Image (tube, helix red, strand yellow):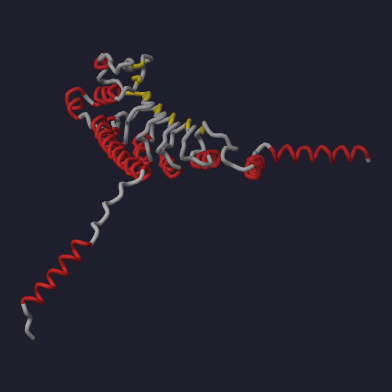
Amino acid sequence: MKVTWRSCHRTSWSVARRYLSASPAPPASPPSAVTRFLLRLRQQFYDVEQLMTWSATFRNRAVRRKNLFYGFAQQNYGDNIAAAYYILSLKGSFRFAGQTEWFQPDARGKFSFDFMNFPTSMIEEVDLSGTPINRDGLDNLVSQLHLRRLSLRGCPEVDGWFLTRLHMFSDSLEELDISHCPRITVGALCALQHLRKLHRLNMSSIPSLQNPGLVRILMEEMLPHCLVTGAEYSQGLSLEDTTQTITTHSSTDPGAQPQEEESGQTSAKRQGQMQ
């Protein structure tokens, strides 16, 4: 089949005319104000999220640095001085056994080094309320076998792993304050069963405890010689459960049954006298 020059010219000219006569495509419409606002909001939230991620990373790094093991101080000044320096560096306070003076930093975190005059004294009371102590920091206190009172009120890093490591003070710890600790759960409290000499436990205002009254009952069953404070039996329980709990405690009261038997014998004697 032959293709002449005229037919090719006619075909190319028709294609060119069709292309030139076609209207150009309309430009893309700009996004609406709502779309622009949503895109801007998304970008800002992404920046805030990234900023929060960086902040959390730096905060965790600072917590790890503050809870490092003070091996240099331990090797050069002994276990007691290293433990005392660690407590003061966290802006906590302590008291040596056999003394009434408390060593604590000032409002700016500065403290005196007079505690270095007692290298052989063991620490008996420690107040670390609101400090960033975590489970790794307990390595600096493991040598304090005469620790009797420990306050961890409002410590944000105290969790179940931390409470598990408190078994090292099972033969000495008598009072423990874990109130206002946001990371403590019901399962974490089970780790306290190893503290055989614990006489007083403060567990008030723990956010994760939905039924503080029931948890108190469980803790009293687990630690029968410990006084649990900071939670009432009625907290988190319905009226029916509270009535049942009070009835259970009344029925298990050792002094209730003899009184009932005594009142029964007295009424029987009175009926015999009347006859």
| Total number of numbered discs in the rendering | 0
At 32% from the left and 30% from the top, the residue drawn is: 132
- Can residue 177 be seen by looking at this rendering? yes
At 20% from the left and 22% from the top, the residue drawn is: 77
Which percent across, then down, holds residue 144? 31, 28
Is 197 left or right of 262, judged from the image as shown? left
Q: Is residue 77 above or below residue 28?
A: above
Is 270 left or right of 217, judged from the image as shown? right
State which quarter of the image contains the N terminus: bottom left
- For the residue pair 33 and 120, the one nearer the viewer reads as 33
Where is residue 231, by image quadrant?
top right
- For the residue pair 31 and 70, the one nearer the viewer reads as 31
Instruction: Tell which residue pokes out farthest to the bottom in this image.
Output: 1
- For the residue pair 47 and 223, the one nearer the viewer reads as 47
Where is residue 45, by image quadrant?
top left
- Can residue 252 be seen by looking at this rendering? no
Which percent across, then down, holds residue 166? 36, 36
Q: Is residue 65 above or below residue 29?
A: above
Where is residue 87, by image quadrant?
top left
Q: Is residue 98 above or below residue 236?
A: above
Instruction: Tell which residue pokes out farthest to the front in this image.
Output: 6
Is 6 left or right of 168, judged from the image as shown? left
State which quarter of the image contains the C terminus: top right
At 66% from the left and 42% from the top, the residue drawn is: 243
Which percent across, then down, holds residue 55? 28, 34
At 87% from the left and 37% from the top, the residue drawn is: 270
Instruction: Tell which residue pokes out farthest to the right in this image.
Output: 275
Which percent across, then down, holds residue 101? 36, 14
